Image (cartoon, rainbow, N blue to C red):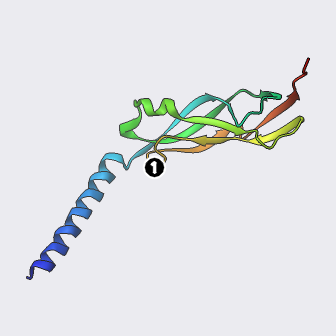
Amino acid sequence: MSHREELKYLLLSFILGISIWLAVNFGERLPLDITRFVELENQKDEYTYEVNPPFVDVTLLVSRKLLQSKLIERVKVYVDVSNLKEGMHRVRITATTPIPILIQPVAINPYYVKVKVIRKVSK
């Protein structure tokens, strides 16, 4: 066998070994239910915002190795209020995680929240 063929097989075995190691260590995912406060993104200074309900339940699929990790605390749930005008709005919630491959949000309950936008009174 030539040196080039040996390198191909060596690289292939290395990739296969890494893939199997990742599947064994991070492959099994378990559901985890958490409750998070709904944060507001892109707020404008001239408005005040009221969110109803202020808390939502999020179901995550988490790798078994990360169940006790502090990364779970960094899951963020927010609504973007940059395009909202005065009044009552129904806005979809967005959930983000620090490592989307290993901590994946699969369900949010409720999926929409009511956001009341009130213009601040200037004196």
Q: Residue at x 15, y 79 (%)?
A: 5
Q: Residue at x 39, y 47 (%)?
A: 28
Q: Is residue 6 above or below residue 43?
A: below
Q: Is residue 103 left or right of residue 26?
A: right
Task: Residue 77 in the image: state x and y as whole percent.
Answer: 62, 36
Q: Is residue 90 above or below residue 12?
A: above
- Type of amino acid at the residue the image marks with label 1: Ile
Q: Is residue 2 above or below residue 123?
A: below
Q: Is residue 24 left or right of residue 75?
A: left
Task: Residue 27 in the image: state x and y as whole percent.
Answer: 37, 50
How many callouts does the rendering have? 1
Q: Quadrant of residue 112?
A: top right
Q: Which residue does the numbered mark 1 point to in the structure image? A: 101
At label 1, counting other C-alpha atoms closer than 10 Å, the crowd grade (few under 14, some 14-19, many 20 or more) is: few
Residue sticking out furthest to the bottom: 1
Q: Is residue 31 left or right of residue 68?
A: right
Q: Nearer the viewer, residue 73 or 31?
A: 73
Q: Residue at x 9, y 82 (%)?
A: 2
Residue sticking out furthest to the front: 123
Task: Residue 21 in the image: state x and y as whole percent.
Answer: 27, 52
Task: Residue 39 in the image: state x and y as whole percent.
Answer: 67, 31
User: In which quadrant is the N terminus drawn?
Assistant: bottom left
Q: Quadrant of residue 108?
A: top right
User: In which quadrant is the C terminus drawn?
Assistant: top right
Q: Nearer the viewer, residue 11 or 81?
A: 81
**Secondary element type, mark 1:** loop
Q: Nearer the viewer, residue 106 or 72?
A: 72
Q: Is residue 64 above or below residue 68?
A: below
Q: Is residue 93 left or right of residue 83?
A: left
